[in-house]
Image (cartoon, grey):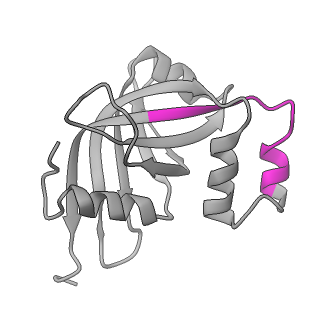
């Protein structure tokens, strides 16, 4: 899959691999209302995909009891945005299909705590890694990507 916009696939991989902002994930509720949530994510450029033309996956961690799990189970079609909050504005947005995968060992969550907070020795990690808290991965397989980069204009 070739993204539209100024970046090629290699630049998308580079950007998503280095991004330290949350992904904004749009979905639909069982009542057919739009919903958006921000989640920590990891980009896995080598993840196998149902689409031969679209390798890669956005991998997010959340509680197994989160409303988002029900929403994605109801309708797996999602939209997403990973973009800078400050100038120069740039990013990747698109749409794809999401699936819920158990993360019993909380491996993804641990790696995201390291990515976003520098490790697991903090109060947030203590709360999220409690043994009684069930964790899942929301895996998004992109079907369309669009990029933008206003660096030269700003």
Q: Is residue 126 left or right of residue 1?
A: right
Is residue 67 at all visible to an observer of this figure?
yes
Image height of 65 relative to 18, above or below:
above
Q: Give me the residue at 50% from left, 51% from top.
A: 42
Residue drawn at the location 23% of the way across and 30% of the way down = 52
Q: Is residue 31 visible?
A: no
Q: What x and y, as percent, mark residue 75?
A: 39, 18
Magenta run includes residue 138: yes
Q: Quadrant of residue 27?
A: top left
Say whether residue 152 is magenta.
Answer: no
Image quadrant for the N terminus?
top left
Residue plotted at (50% across, 55% down): 22
Relative height, residue 51 to residue 25 (above, below) = above
Location of residue 79 in the rendering, given as x and y in whole percent from the top left corner: 33, 38
Q: Nearer the viewer, residue 87 or 126?
A: 126
The relative height of residue 100 versus residue 149 in the rendered view (above or below) is above
**What residue is drawn where x is 38% and y is 68%?**
84
Give how far across and how far down residue 93 sits, in percent.
28, 50
Segment tinted magenta in the rendering: 124-139
Of 25 and 112, the residue lying toward us: 112
Q: How many marks?
A: 0
Q: Position of residue 89 (x, y in %)?
A: 30, 72
Task: Give the left or right position of residue 100, taking residue 54 as reference.
Answer: right
Q: Is residue 94 left or right of residue 110?
A: left
Quadrant containing the C terminus is bottom left
Which of the 4 image quarters holds residue 5? bottom left
């Amino acid at each position: 899959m070739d993204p539209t916009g100024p970046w090629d696939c290699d630049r998308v991989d580079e950007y998503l691999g280095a991004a330290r902002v949350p992904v904004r994930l749009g979905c639909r509720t069982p009542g057919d209302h739009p919903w958006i949530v921000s989640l920590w994510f990891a980009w896995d450029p080598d993840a196998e995909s149902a689409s031969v033309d679209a390798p890669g996956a956005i991998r997010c961690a959340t509680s197994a009891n989160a409303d988002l799990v029900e929403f994605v189970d109801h309708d797996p079609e999602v939209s997403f945005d990973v973009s800078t909050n400050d100038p120069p504005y740039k990013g990747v947005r698109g749409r794809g299909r999401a699936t819920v995968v158990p993360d019993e060992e909380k491996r993804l969550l641990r790696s995201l705590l390291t990515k976003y907070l520098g490790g697991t020795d903090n109060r947030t990690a203590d709360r999220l890694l409690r043994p009684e808290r069930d964790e899942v991965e929301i895996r998004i397989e992109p079907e369309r990507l669009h990029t933008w980069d206003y660096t030269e204009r700003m």
